[in-house]
Amino acid sequence: MTRPAKDFFAPLAVGAPAPLREIPARPSRAIHFFDPGNEKMAAKIPDMVGTVDVLLGNLEDAVKAENKEKSRQGLVEIGRATANLGSTAGPTQFWTRVNSLDSPWGLDDLVTLVTEIGDKLDVIMVPKVQGAEDIHYVDRLLAQLEAKAGLERPILVHAILETARGVANIEEICAASPRMQGLSLGPADLAADRRMKTTRVGGGHPGYLVRQDPTRDDLGVPQYDAERTSYQQDLWHYTIARMVDACAMHGIYPYYGPFGDIKDTVACEDQFRNAFLLGCVGAWSLHPVQIKIAHQVFSPSVEDVAHARRVIAAMGDGTGAVMIDGKMEDDASVKQCQVMVALADELAAIDPDLKALYDGIDA
Ligand SMILES: CC(C)(COP(=O)(O)OP(=O)(O)OC[C@H]1O[C@@H](n2cnc3c(N)ncnc32)[C@H](O)[C@@H]1OP(=O)(O)O)[C@@H](O)C(=O)NCCC(=O)NCCSC(=O)C[C@](C)(O)C(=O)O
Ligand SMILES: [Mg+2]
């Protein structure tokens, strides 16, 4: 059961910082994953600060069991040594994905990271969240650890949807704590848990398609063997749409997760763009090549920002209807335009290139 309204924003431990009343809309177009125990990747992190919205030290899947402690310790060292990373220090946020709550490492991950580098960490991503009970557990534990570490700012929590139960409980997960920052799709684990017959990490599938009806001959007989167009469909549409609604309802943020076919940058861009259009604010980057794709896709285009500003200017107080370029604009379309412009303003505040582009529209 969720706490009553009067207690919802009370700290869960004596001395813990007060929960935030509103989750800040910090740009997080790309959440870039790295293994802090991998020397080559770790060496690249200091230079990546300022080039990507979020750097996430991954401790869970993709880190071998025998390296779990090394990766955890590596993350502590990166957190301590890297300038301008995390908290309110600079434009690049510092996140981690801890091991799952039922694993032998999840507890030590949380205890070590919050007490050692909790002042740097913005968000902790919790994998395989099944229901509100998982968030309640993490919520209380984080409050205890924050109090112990003397933190002045609460660490936020991000849940990955990777099980059918997690998806079924999506609304209660979002509502479970004022720490909830957002949700990501975990397509690989989710596919396995749902018994989907795929073997991929995100993306589409050539077998999941809709085919054009057969043409008919002059007598009206269907020509089943004639050429027909087929369109590949999006396996993840349902889940992403559920995530977007649940997050919007709770004032938190939805993200597409990983796209595992690193070499297929075109399909990666398509998948990210679908998520952007549906309402997601970002996606994961597993390889440096995906950062640019996510930053570009999750930033409104100059054309969209220009159009949105025109509509807002033409709509005055935001009521009524006007014609712009042959299209009707009214109270509802101006609200969409306001979403676009607000995002452009947030991004321009941290990205000088985008600022120059968006400023150039009015010049
Ligand atoms: C895909 C891999 C194996 C290709 O790694 P590679 O070494 O073959 O790639 P490369 O192109 O040869 O690498 C070139 C250089 O970039 C470096 N590099 C390469 N990647 C990175 C990186 N991320 N960050 C920083 N540096 C990176 C790499 O070390 C190398 O450095 P070098 O030039 O000095 O030799 C590698 O990129 C990698 O391990 N990426 C992270 C994978 C990961 O985090 N997976 C877990 C998230 S997805 C997931 O868990 C699923 C989910 C949600 O749970 C669910 O759906 O259920
Ligand atoms: Mg997973």
Image: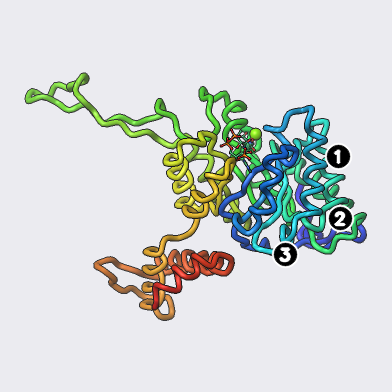
Residue 27 percent coordinates (x, y): 59, 60
Amino acid type shown at disc 1:
Asp
> Which circle marks residue 179 in the picture?
none
Can you say whether 118 is above or below 109 in the image? below
Report, in whole angstroms, how far the alpha carbon at label 2 lies from the one at label 3.
Answer: 17 Å
Amino acid type shown at disc 3:
Thr
Instruction: Count up the numbered dots.
Output: 3
**Res. 67 image quadrant:** top right
Left or right, 130 with reference to 344: right
Q: Does the CB distance between marks 1 and 2 fall below 8 Å? A: no
> For the residue carrying disc 3, how many other residues have a C-alpha within 10 Å: few (<14), some (14-19), or many (20+)?
some
Q: Which residue is mark 2?
A: 146
Amino acid type shown at disc 2:
Glu
Q: Quadrant of ligand 1?
A: top right
Q: Earlier in the sequence, mark 2 or mark 3?
A: 3
Q: Nearer the viewer, residue 1 or 40?
A: 40
Q: Which residue is mark 3?
A: 88
Q: Which residue is mark 1?
A: 108
> For the residue carrying disc 2, how many other residues have a C-alpha within 10 Å: few (<14), some (14-19), or many (20+)?
many
Please, which residue is most extreme toward the top here?
225
Residue plotted at (47% across, 50% down): 278
Report, in whole angstroms, how far the alpha carbon at label 3 lies from the one at label 1.
Answer: 25 Å
Q: Nearer the viewer, residue 2 or 25?
A: 25
Q: Nearer the viewer, residue 134 or 285?
A: 285
Left or right, 356 with reference to 19: left
**Res. 351 image quadrant:** bottom right
Residue plotted at (77% across, 49% down): 78
| Quarter of the rendering occupied by the C terminus | bottom left
Residue 147 percent coordinates (x, y): 90, 57
Report, in whole angstroms, how far the alpha carbon at label 1 lies from the one at label 2.
Answer: 15 Å
What kind of element bears circle 2?
A: helix
Q: Nearer the viewer, mark 1 or mark 2?
A: 1
